[in-house]
Amino acid sequence: MMKGPKKWRLFALMTALLVFLSGCGREEISTLIPAGKVAQDQFNLLILSSIVMLFVIIVVTIIYVLAIVKFRRSKVGEDMIPEQVEGSARLEFIWTAIPIVLLLILAVPTVYSTFDLADVTAMDAQDEEGVAENLTVNVTGKLYWWEFEYPEQEIRTAQELVVPTGERVYFNLIAADVKHSFWIPSVGGKLDVNPENVNTFYLEFDKESSELEEGVYFGKCAELCGPSHALMDFKVKTLNRENFDAWVAAMQEEQEAPSEALAQEGQEVFEQSCIACHATNAAGAATGVGPNLATFGDRTTIAGFMEHDEETLKNWIADPQQYKPGNLMPNPEEINNGEAFSDQELDALAAYLMSLKIEE
């Protein structure tokens, strides 16, 4: 059995560890560093509930300590029986009223925020010319990646969501296969992504992601969806409205052919082996069953979590199951007449994919 001093040492160690870990939050992924109005409202509820719980803990602890000190046997004797208060109307009223008050303190702002954050009536608002007044993004969760469609702008991308700052962005969420959960911890709470129905909500982004250490906010799938659930990440780039409009305009343009010879060779290999699953044009209707690669060279990661460089990309193409088990991307042998890509083909493919950029 652990002795008293050892118990206190363990408690002190855990307390110190808690203090140190509380400072480990990263701005691009921490729920404790709100980066938008939705996140701030939810953070305020978290603080309020924590204060209420701390109040209850303090009150109960004080009563417990007072009872121990006041009625310890060495002071009142072995035969002393405290005054019995059963049937006291005053006490019964107090310990009934206090929980009700605490519940009201929690319930009123919680219910208000729940209805306010679920209000998406402005999603379909249009101006006099029939143009949508607010940005809407259709999000589709797939094994194990995310597709982002901008229906009003008629563009789509994957793995990196790009949104404007300082305004509400509305989302339609649906899954193409199994249940997922859409979550950008720094910007707002998670919401289920179901195969059978569309869930809607909105978020607001206050800060441009270029100011962050990583240059992006981190998004996660928060629903256990398969062996690579933990690797189903996406990134969020936030731009001011002017830069966002410029990004949209660039996305709507036809993708230019690469100028370098190696990248041109990679395009030929891509069109022979990969084009059935992946599109390299962001405009128009969805094509292919895999992620849209129109902005692949602008991304910050490969497959949502790997380093964004050509060597990593070649390793990923050569054996995707090794890095992301259960994903639906076939090995090269399945799409290249039963043969693996040669080193030259892998070099060419990597050069071509890294050339797919729209950002300067």
Image (cartoon, rainbow, N blue to C red):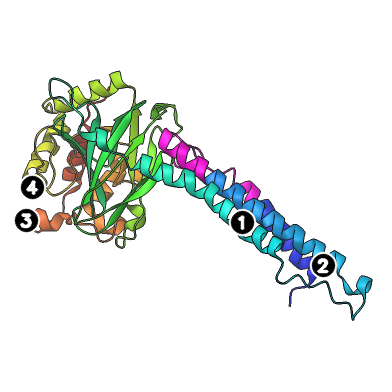
Secondary structure at numbered mark 4: loop
Instruction: Kindly report the distance in space between the C-alpha atoms of the residues bearing marks 1 and 4.
Output: 66 Å
Instruction: Kindly report the distance in space between the C-alpha atoms of the residues bearing marks 1 and 2.
Output: 25 Å
Q: Quadrant of residue 170?
A: top left
Which numbered disc flags the more N-terminal residue, 2 or 3? 2
Instruction: Kindly report the distance in space between the C-alpha atoms of the residues bearing marks 2 and 3.
Output: 80 Å
In this view, the mark in front (4 or 3): 4
Residues under numbered marks 2 and 4 in contact, where contact means CB atoms less than 8 Å apart = no
**Is residue 274 shown left or right of residue 300?**
left
Q: Quadrant of residue 79?
A: bottom right
In this view, the mark in front (1 or 2): 1
Task: Please name the amino acid that badge 2 sits on.
Answer: Ile
Residue that badge 2 annotates: 68
In this view, the mark in front (1 or 4): 1
Which numbered disc flags the more N-terminal residue, 2 or 4? 2
The residue that appears at 14% across and 38% down in the rendered structure is 266
Q: What span is colored magenta in the figure?
A: 18-45
Secondary structure at numbered mark 2: helix
Residue that badge 3 annotates: 337
Q: Dividing the image into 4 quarters, which one contains the C terminus?
A: top left
Q: Is residue 357 above or below residue 81?
A: above
Asked if the stretch drawn in magenta spans residue 125, the answer is no
Instruction: Kindly report the distance in space between the C-alpha atoms of the residues bearing marks 4 and 3.
Output: 14 Å
Secondary structure at numbered mark 1: helix
Which numbered disc flags the more N-terminal residue, 1 or 4? 1
The answer to whether residue 289 shows anywhere in this view is yes
Task: Please name the amino acid that badge 1 sits on.
Answer: Ala
Q: Dividing the image into 4 quarters, which one contains the N terminus?
A: bottom right
Q: Quadrant of residue 164?
A: top left
In this view, the mark in front (2 or 4): 2
In this view, the mark in front (2 or 3): 2
